Amino acid sequence: MIHGRLRPALLGAVALAATGLLVGCADDDDGAATTSTGAPASTTTAAGAGAPSAAGDLGDASVRLVDLGLEADSPIDLTFRPGSTSLIVAERGGAIREAVRDGDGYRLLDDPVIDLTDAVGSTASERGMLGVAVSPDGEHLYVSYTEASEGDSRIVQYPLTGDDGELRAEPAAARQLVAIDQPFANHNGGALRFGTDGMLYAGFGDGGSGNDPEGNGQARDTLLGKILRIDPSAPDGVPADNPFASGEADGRPAEPLIWATGLRNPWRIDIDPATGDLWVADVGQNEQEEVDRLAAADGGGRGVNLGWDLFEGTNRIDEPDPAPGAASAGPFVEPVLTYTHDEGCSITGGVVVRDPQLPALDGAFLFGDFCQPWIRAVRVGADGNVQSADLGLDVASVVSFARGPDDEVLVVSLDGTIGRLAPA
């Protein structure tokens, strides 16, 4: 088990949307902007090379959202077991349930795969069940949540057994991989994704409040404000080729699980199954939301610094950075896309489209905003330029995107709606 830097519990200001939850928690100090222009998101230069898509213009995409008819209780994320036709739906309160194929749709089963309601406890502010993943061999279920007693972050592994319609995780065989003390109630992150390298990637926010008061985003001796890379097969969970696997950097202590630094609150990540590129949707504070692409050809994000709290999107932060040492010296990865709070307030990532039924979107990263009902796509073209487009969909309170058993794109709304993207 790996522990992050331990901190005492503190009280912090938390921004909430009108629903009582703003999962990404932008605008900690001033409240969230709620206007939307409906215009395509602004773009910046792509960061790094890779295997860019040669697909056509994103403006040619014409899609609709097909409601799967599930009545989940505040669904927060979903995944599937390789080789299975079922979906595994994580509810914010702690239950993880199986949805089985039923004609052209799905049917949610009453008996849970595992019920972690007692372990999760409170769903106040941005706490609760946050992310779920299944190992590439289908043998284990991984969950990311805030635990009941103090609201601290956990990643736990459970054996996954049974056939479709009878999937079960074994609570008695739980193995805790990560434990992080959370100083505030917000910015918990919670995204989980397996990479093409078989490693488990996890996103955690900077610990909360506003302006990163403890300097966690740039500090290498804490797991807060980071993307982690975990080897579940290793006794200590540390991949030998992680950038700080030795436990130090520049002569100072560094957490061995760190893969990338400088994040504020990564609300969903994805790894392109075709290229291995790591995509990150990182929630901004008062001005900008951002999408980052970390190309596999450039190391897939190994040891990179995404800039928070020196940068919010492309904007330089005036306040001095409290992190010690050379961690804050850069270089910094620039976002491939940003948008302002005239268009939303809290970005929700994201999934790279590899669905053969959606060729116009091939290689595009889809994302939404918790405060506005649009869904957009961004793609790095063969010429290295960035395209972005609004898909013309209307989905409220988007909290996650996922890839289904047939590479279909699934969209999760906190209001209970789970939909599949289909050609118009």
Image (cartoon, grey):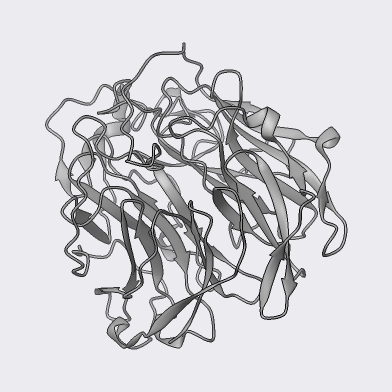
Compared across the picture, whether 407 is left or right of 359 comes to right
The reply to whether residue 236 is visible in this rendering is no
User: What residue is at 19 percent from the left and 46 percent from the top?
Assistant: 33
| Quadrant assignment, res 31 | top left
Q: In which quadrant of the rendered image does the C terminus lie?
A: bottom left
Nearer-the-camera pick, 233 or 138? 138
The reply to whether residue 316 is visible in this rendering is yes
Q: Position of residue 313 (x, y in %)?
A: 22, 48
Q: Position of residue 172 (x, y in %)?
A: 85, 33
Where is 102 relative to 156, above or below? below
User: What residue is at 69 percent from the left and 28 percent from the top?
Assistant: 118
Compared across the picture, whether 93 is left or right of 336 comes to right
Q: Position of residue 166 (x, y in %)?
A: 85, 58
Q: How many labels, in total?
A: 0
Nearer-the-camera pick, 373 or 71? 71
Question: Given the current orientation, which residue lies at the most extreme left position?
Answer: 318
User: What residue is at 32 percent from the left and 41 percent from the top?
Assistant: 18
Where is 50 relative to 24, above or below? below
